Amino acid sequence: MQATTFKRSLLAVTLIAAVGAGYAKLGGEVINSADAVAALGEAAAPAAGVTARNGVGLPDFTGIVAHSGPAVVNISATGTSKTAFSGGERGQRGQQIPDFFRHFGIPSPDEGAPSRGMGSGFIVRADGVILTNAHVVSGADEVTVKLTDKREFKAKVVGLDKVTDVAVLRIDATNLPVVRLGNPGSAQVGEWVVAIGSPFGFENTVTAGIVSAKGRSLASDSYVPFIQTDVAVNPGNSGGPLINLNGEVIGINSQIYSRNGGYQGVSFAIPIDVAMNIEQQLLQHGKVSHGRMGVTIQEVSQSLAQSFGLKTATGALISSVEKGSPAATAGLEPGDVILKLNDREITRSSELPPLVAAIKPGTRISVQIWRKGATREIALAVGEIPTAAVAANGAGESDNPRLGLALRPLTPEERGQSGGQGGLVVENVSGPAARAGIQRGDVVLSLNGQPVGDVAQLRALLDKSGKTVALLIERDDAKIFVPVDIG
């Protein structure tokens, strides 16, 4: 019996090794690969719906690459980054260091150093609209897009959303090749998928694998139900498409799980329906709105379910409720278990944040909860994530490319903490403002001595200004005037 098992295993190994060459040796006779597969029995036969090539149950990606490849672009982003001196030593020594560099005509470390990044993207509209990751172009002064036909364009960042890590670019071109968009909801765990991108700068590299899981929630990105794959994704692949066997884009390759910075078999893609929702909002409104409830949730374990009287470990357990939030106003409490959002059952806590984030702020929803051994229906008006509306170098909350700041008004909570004063919070910084030393999180209080309370007011003051403006900045409870050369 052992000898028979060994021979069958050896036969399988021989066939696997030979199948790529299109032939195998069985019982001393050379046969083709199709017959070799048949010799292994039905278990080795091609699965239904999988395109076979040369009689072997392996997918053929050539048609996918031929159609989608020309619509995948290489993205280069240049900007200004801070060095170790930024925000460092103060006082006399802190003043001497910048003066030393300026004396020799060298930009000081506090003024930032040039930085360069690379990534991928893909064309979704023939008139030049491109999707990529927000982290690929965030803080960039200049973005260059290179097509497969070697044409290069300076791209405009229409806007970006750091909550979902999606950015929209536009180039001045027409009749461009575009990708086909698919439905990520219909993707099945175990099905083949393809990634096209520029890992390590190698343009239009094609890798393949399978969908490993769906609806993954990562600690840093709980608002995105990621598609997990084992497709080889490396630095430079960010922003490129994840494509199914129908040649349809179902996701944007965004992250990898790695201990050394390279591919280790676990990568994550943003579902394309999430990305297209961001694209539509940025193109139509210049900003992105995400819904929020104002609760902290955790998974319901079996022991917790028993303690709360639930028959099964399901739902999202509320561990805390933010004061003044929509959830607090509606009467939700710590210890409530959210079972349904409208008619959608919540089986795992990770399912709730993406669903809420996708709802338009102000929309009234019905939440079914479990409290003290019984279910209740609670009506709730969805709020808005205050830091979500970030459009860089485009319309919406961005001030003006001359200054290089993306700004938002203070939230009511922030205004209360600041004693009721106005100002604009810096969400993103690049160009002249970055070179002047302004940082994300700073609060702009005035421009040339005139208080600013909203972006429109700042734009109006900026239009009347000369080549240099003085911004009053608050940082860490300290205020300082910062001169910005806007040319």
Image (cartoon, rainbow, N blue to C red):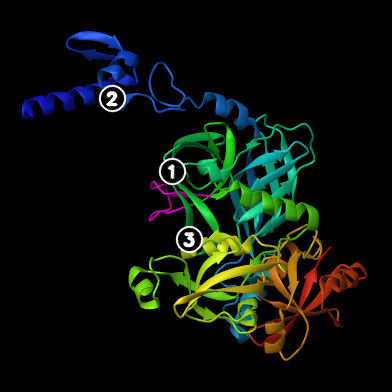
Q: Determine the secondary structure under disc 2.
A: helix
Up the image or down, 134 lies above or below 71; here it is below
Taking the image as drawn, is residue 274 in sight? yes
Between marks 1 and 3 in the image, the one whose residue lies nearer the viewer: 1
State the residue at coordinates (52%, 72%): 369
Q: From mark 3 to mark 2, how far is it between C-alphas?
A: 37 Å
Looking at the image, is mark 2 or mark 1 earlier in the sequence?
2
For this orientation, the residue located farthest to the bottom is 419
Up the image or down, 13 lies above or below 227; here it is above
Q: Is residue 353 left or right of residue 473?
A: left
99, 447: nearer the viewer? 447
Residue 149 highlighted magenta (yes or no)? no
Residue 16 is tagged as 2
Q: Amino acid at mark 1?
A: Val
Q: Amino acid at mark 2?
A: Ile
| Pointer 3 residue | 218
Up the image or down, 25 lies above or below 85; here it is above
Q: Determine the secondary structure under disc 3.
A: strand
Q: Amino acid at mark 3?
A: Leu
Looking at the image, is mark 1 or mark 3 earlier in the sequence?
1
> Residue 44, located in which quarter of the rendered image?
top left
| Pointer 1 residue | 189
> Residue 473, located in which quarter of the rendered image?
bottom right
Q: Residues within 10 Å of mark 2 (few under 14, many from 20)?
A: some
Between marks 2 and 1 in the image, the one whose residue lies nearer the viewer: 1
For this orientation, the residue located farthest to the front is 374
Q: From mark 2 to mark 1, how far is it between C-alphas?
A: 24 Å
Q: Which residues are magenta?
A: 256-269
Residue 399 is tagged as none
State the residue at coordinates (39%, 46%): 265
Q: Main secondary structure of the magenta part?
A: loop
